[in-house]
DNA sequence: ACTCGGATCGACT
DNA sequence: GTCGATCCGAGTT
């Protein structure tokens, strides 16, 4: 689908954008991955979102147009990637949590020497940023621009069966942990196993 | 200027 | 299951 058609799909509320990102292909630095696990973050309505307290220099891309890359450093070590969603000013984004390497395997293996299986190359948000060679300086990139060096191609409508889409609580968040805003494709070996944050309140319900 | 804690990962027991 | 690595942004003084 065209970049602008993709942008229209992503310029929606973040659960819809998250669903649209499953099965998408993300390409950067000689590696392509098929996205199989994502999490929606709902801006000012979501205490777990980096945008909860409003716009800052770090998160400003979340408040811009949909289809742009928001990169942050996690635990001082890892770079994690989001795709901005919703209309300008919304502060919504979707965290990319896992992908299957679909191209450039040699470069992927080179960047992820610690991975012992192909499925582990892009399993987990930190590993996904690593396998794609993403850095903080890539934040803000328009993933849908024609000829973009870092690019996103959504799966055509109907290509990802709704029956394969699963949802559950988000990983690692210490607040608002019980909303089922993590989506993944059932059966993908690259989906990370669920681990609740040790800082989260006890499970609800 | 300083403190604090994190949307993680992998090695180790 | 437990723990250390490592650094930046954000909030506070």
Image: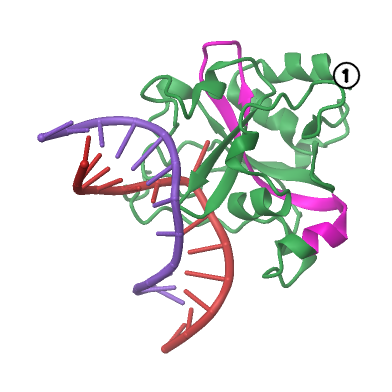
Chain colours: A green, B red, C purple
Residue in the foreground of this view, choosing between A7 and A195: A7
| Horizontal side of residue A202 vs A115, given as left or right | left
Residue in the foreground of this view, choosing between A201 and A55: A55
- Could you say which quadrant of the image residue A14 lies in? top right
In the picture, the quarter occupied by the C terminus of chain A is: top left
Residue A165 vs A103, above or below: the answer is above
Residue beneath the point at 81% across and 33% down:
A149
Provide residue A144's location: percent of width, then percent of height.
Answer: 78, 23
Q: Is residue A181 magenta?
A: no
| Horizontal side of residue A74 vs B10, given as left or right | left
Residue A170 visible in the snapshot = no
Residue A44 vs A200, above or below: the answer is above
The magenta region covers A83-109
Residue beneath the point at 47% across and 29% down:
A58
Residue in the foreground of this view, choosing between A86 and A108: A108
Residue A13 vs A15, above or below: the answer is above
Q: Chain of mark 1?
A: A
| Horizontal side of residue A125 vs A190, given as left or right | left
- Few, some or many C-alpha atoms within 10 Å of disc 1 (few <14, some 14-19, many ≥20)? few
Provide residue A26's location: percent of width, then percent of height.
Answer: 78, 39
């Amino acid at each position: 689908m065209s970049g602008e058609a993709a942008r229209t799909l992503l310029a929606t509320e973040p659960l819809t954008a998250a669903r649209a990102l499953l099965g998408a292909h993300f390409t950067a630095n000689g590696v392509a991955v098929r996205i199989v696990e994502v999490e929606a973050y709902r801006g000012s309505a979501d205490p777990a979102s980096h945008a909860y307290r409003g716009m800052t220099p770090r998160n400003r891309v979340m408040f811009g147009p949909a289809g742009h890359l928001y990169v942050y450093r996690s635990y001082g070590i890892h770079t994690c990637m989001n795709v901005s969603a919703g209309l300008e000013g919304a502060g919504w984004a979707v965290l990319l949590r896992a992908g299957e390497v679909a191209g450039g395997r040699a470069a992927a293996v080179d960047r992820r020497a610690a991975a012992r299986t192909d499925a582990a190359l892009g399993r987990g948000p930190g590993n996904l940023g690593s396998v794609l060679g993403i850095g903080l300086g890539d934040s803000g990139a328009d993933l849908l621009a024609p000829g973009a060096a870092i690019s996103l191609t959504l799966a055509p409508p109907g290509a990802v069966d709704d029956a394969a889409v699963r949802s559950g609580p988000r990983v690692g968040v210490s607040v608002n942990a019980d909303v089922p805003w993590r989506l993944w494709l059932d059966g993908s070996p690259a989906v990370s196993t669920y681990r609740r944050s040790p800082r989260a309140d006890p499970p609800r319900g």
